[in-house]
Amino acid sequence: MAVNSFRPQKYEDFEIIDDNQKVVGHIRVKPSGVLWAPSNAKEWHGVSLDDFAVYMMKNGKRQKK
């Protein structure tokens, strides 16, 4: 008998909105990297997870969980 399982999503999308609830961009998180696109753009800009981690260690502020 076959065992059923859940298929994990390939990515998660998030909208970035301003104070007036207007969409100003999109973030897509994938297992291989992070992508960003401005509102109404047809192209995404991305970095690998390794590059993202290096950038965040250099430029990110320390946060509590």
Image (cartoon, grey):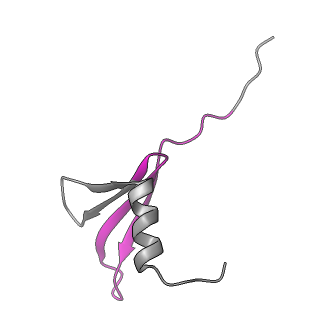
In the rendered structure, does residue 13 fall within the stretch colored magenta?
A: yes
Q: Nearer the viewer, residue 22 or 57?
A: 57
Q: Residue furthest right?
A: 1
Q: State the count of labels.
A: 0
Q: Nearer the viewer, residue 12 or 40?
A: 12
Please provide percent x and percent y for residue 22: 30, 78
Q: State the quadrant of the N terminus.
A: top right
Q: Residue furthest top?
A: 1
Please provide percent x and percent y for residue 46: 30, 55
At 20% from the left edge and 62% from the top edge, which residue is drawn?
40
Please provide percent x and percent y for residue 32: 44, 46
At 44% from the left edge and 55% from the top edge, which residue is drawn?
50
Up/down of 8 relative to 60, above or below: above
Give the extent of the magenta segment. 6-33
Q: State the quadrant of the C terminus.
A: bottom right
At 34% from the left edge and 83% from the top edge, which residue is drawn?
18
Q: Nearer the viewer, residue 60 or 65?
A: 60
- Which of the 4 quarters of the picture holds residue 24? bottom left
At 48% from the left edge and 41% from the top edge, which residue is drawn?
10
Q: Nearer the viewer, residue 22 or 42?
A: 42
In the rendered structure, does residue 11 fall within the stretch colored magenta?
A: yes
